[in-house]
Amino acid sequence: MSTQRFSSVAHWGAFTAVVEDGRFVRAEPFERDPAPSAMLDAMPAMVYSDKRVMRPAVRREWLEKRTRERSGAHNEFVEVDWGTALDLAAGEIRRVREQHGPQGLFGGSYGWSSAGRVNHAKTLVRRFLFSGGGCVDQIGTYSFGAGQTLLPHIIGTADPIGGKVTSWASIVKHCKVFVAFGGLALRNAQITSGGGGEHSLPVWLQRCKEAGIRFINIGPNRNDCPDWLEAQWIPLRPGTDTALMLAVAHELVTSGRHQPEYLARYTHGYGQLEAYVLGASDGIAKTPEWASPICGVPAADIRALADTLAGTCSMLSIAWSLQRAHRGEQPYWMCVTLAAMLGQIGVPGGGVAFGHGSSNGVGIPRPEVGAPEMAPGHNPGAAHNIPVARMADMLLAPGEQYHFNGKLCTYPDVRLVCWAGGNPYHHHQDLNRLNRAWNKPETVIVNESWWTPTARRADIVFPVTTTLERNDIGASSRDRFVFAMQRAIAPVGEARDDYAIFRALAARLGHEEAFTEGRDQAQWLRHVYDRYASIAASRGYPQPDFDAWWAHGYSELPEPEKDFVLFESFYADPQANPLKTPSGKIEIGSDKIAAMGYADCPGHPVWLAPDEWLGSAGAEYPLHLMTIQPPDKLHSQGAFAPSVQQYKVNGREAVRLNPRDAKARGIANGDPVRLYNRRGACLGGALLDEAVLEGVAVMATGAWYAPDADGLDVNGNPNVLAADRGTSSLTQGCAALSVLVQIEPVAA
Ligand SMILES: Nc1nc2c(c(=O)[nH]1)N[C@H]1C(S)=C(S)[C@@H](COP(=O)(O)OP(=O)(O)OC[C@H]3O[C@@H](n4cnc5c(=O)[nH]c(N)nc54)[C@H](O)[C@@H]3O)O[C@H]1N2
Ligand SMILES: Nc1nc2c(c(=O)[nH]1)N[C@H]1C(S)=C(S)[C@@H](COP(=O)(O)OP(=O)(O)OC[C@H]3O[C@@H](n4cnc5c(=O)[nH]c(N)nc54)[C@H](O)[C@@H]3O)O[C@H]1N2
Ligand SMILES: [Mo]
């Protein structure tokens, strides 16, 4: 038997691919990873799955009659040769471009793609369509769309939400109290976008604990912090953090424990917020007694939280989940405000941070060198771009106007959709509504390795290699390592690399040179690495040359000697180092946002009840459904793998429920259940758990949508239940977490 070993990396971690007699048999964790993810176990089953797309395929009804009814589950496909599939796709792209211009082509194509940066499908589909004359692209992310649009207005940058926050090293040295809104879920820290060498969150939390830092987990689920951290749990109703923070602010102001000098020196518009907190502007004082019935936290506990925070070095870390909700700007804005009222922003170990528990690598000590990446280039069609999560709105209502970040915009009239590296039938909200939107375009082209629900609803499907079948470079701006991703096996079936597919399409459409810039894939790999290595070297971090790096399997940046503290120089001298906001300061009140005149996002943080939350629960849909990230996989990737099945409850997607809610419905542990609301229904398996707040149900995203004849999703993708509405007129982000449902037992 011959055994070969290849270096590689996935979003869930770096590994060695072990190949025996030409077959990939095992992914062994990177030897320097202190906490590898079990997701590696799924990889051989993913690569050799019977769900692989083996050959180019065309939907029969589209091929023969150009029908658009593609959103059903039972589409029939015809396999064709590569030449035929490429000709068909290129012909459609040419036709739509000639008839409708860039606004007829949708290349927004959101999704995680692979860790490989050269064959990064989401980048390549843009590069292809941009270089051919432009397309409709998407703005922002599902992950933190609301925060991304809001934060530049109030702190002058969105960088901190991407992980550039005060480093753990600084926290360990200086912080006394770490408040985690939405917790610090180790489950989510299995993932680093682009792939990580070190899963470091558990290591840093252990160091914090040894340093005596006190942790407070605020949210609906005690499981959001590992038990060993011994965090205090403040159970809170989903979507109500802003009310709690306002009441803490009230307590600080009325007891004179806020920091007026800090607020005068570093912030703008505090007076409006104080008037609102005290009730001077709207007649309602935001006291702990006011907040308590909203968020379900006793007033005494809110006062105690204010006592804990006043005069102490505190880090307020807010999970990305809080802004992935209706009115999701408010908890972010109010959290920044509270940290400023405590005088902590810019102080070593203190202040505000985003997503410490949302992804691996947030706040890791790492030098300021960008990770290697492929550039999508300039989009001549950019004027038609839409906020990422408004995709179904766009397809359903071309020509309709909508507000976004102070502008009145118009949805483009999209005729053709190109999707590569994402699974909208996993990630988008209200899948029954998406079904209607998905029948609108004339043509849908999908690049996929597997027959995902999205591929099954396309007209032309191109089979794509997995990362094991091609050479690439894997790296993340939240990790110190850059990995060689070495081709370990031959392509499965007739799969081709995304780069080769888009290059072939560009050649047929006459813009191959603009797409390739004269480089083949191997030359791009060298080019992207060399560019990274020269930037790193210019910052004082010399890197091995390409061949040495490739042979070794990885390179590494050192941990910086100095701890990164967010807004340190602004804190030291706000005149000399202003923030990039209109006032140069932290905008607790924003004149710019106020001038936009949005009732759903006024000029300072406010409590706005979400459309769906426990305070609005009628008898019909009384449970708040948290659609969290799956512990067993990255989104929908490998949902079919045998190693993922152990997370199911009697073969169904797990739904965690408080035992009292279960009892009231006659549901026992392990029972099959049906979750439903007016938008749709799916099946799940009940898991009774005291750690889940009463009135809340928890179900992970990621199951492959599989509706039966009545539209009941038997696999349990909670996006059949989630509402498809924007966070607000300001940010138009994904608001997936504001969902009410009912749950009932069903026969096994
Ligand atoms: N209800 C609810 N919905 C949510 C969320 C939530 O919290 N609640 N979270 C949202 C968030 S934050 C996100 S980021 C999205 C994630 O949504 P997606 O990013 O769409 O989810 P993935 O399953 O990772 O989809 C990636 C797809 O790319 C394919 N792929 C992988 N590698 C390659 C490649 O090299 N080439 C090509 N062509 N394809 C490849 C995979 O097979 C997979 O189908 O979901 C969002 N949806
Ligand atoms: N294993 C795994 N990890 C992942 C991913 C994955 O697919 N699998 N996806 C990655 C991606 S793309 C992203 S964007 C991040 C997302 O990171 P997050 O958005 O932080 O992740 P979630 O799991 O959606 O939510 C985290 C916790 O927030 C709590 N929560 C929800 N709503 C509220 C609220 O209103 N108030 C409070 N206080 N708490 C609330 C829930 O109890 C939930 O467990 O995760 C990343 N990590
Ligand atoms: Mo995300």
Image (tube, helix red, strand yellow):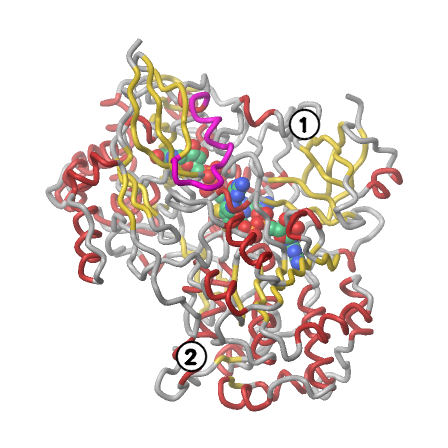
Count the labels in the image: 2
Q: Residue at x 78, y 60 (%)?
A: 615
- Residue 1 in the image: state x and y as whole percent: 31, 8
Residue at the disc numbered 2: 581
Rendered position, 522 above or below 596: above
Q: Along the horizontal axis of the image, is 212 left or right of 458?
A: right
Q: Earlier in the sequence, mark 1 or mark 2?
A: 2
Q: Is residue 540 left or right of residue 236?
A: left
Q: Is residue 212 magenta?
A: no
Q: Residues within 10 Å of mark 1 (few under 14, many from 20)?
A: many
Q: Is mark 1 within 8 Å of ligand 1?
A: no
Q: Position of residue 530 (x, y in %)?
A: 16, 48
Q: Is residue 519 visible?
A: yes
Q: Quadrant of residue 384?
A: bottom left
Q: Which residues are magenta?
A: 30-45
The one of 22 and 206 positioned closer to us in this rendering? 206
Q: Circle 1 — which element? A: loop
Q: Which residue is mark 1?
A: 652
Residue farthest toward the left in the current orientation of the protein = 518
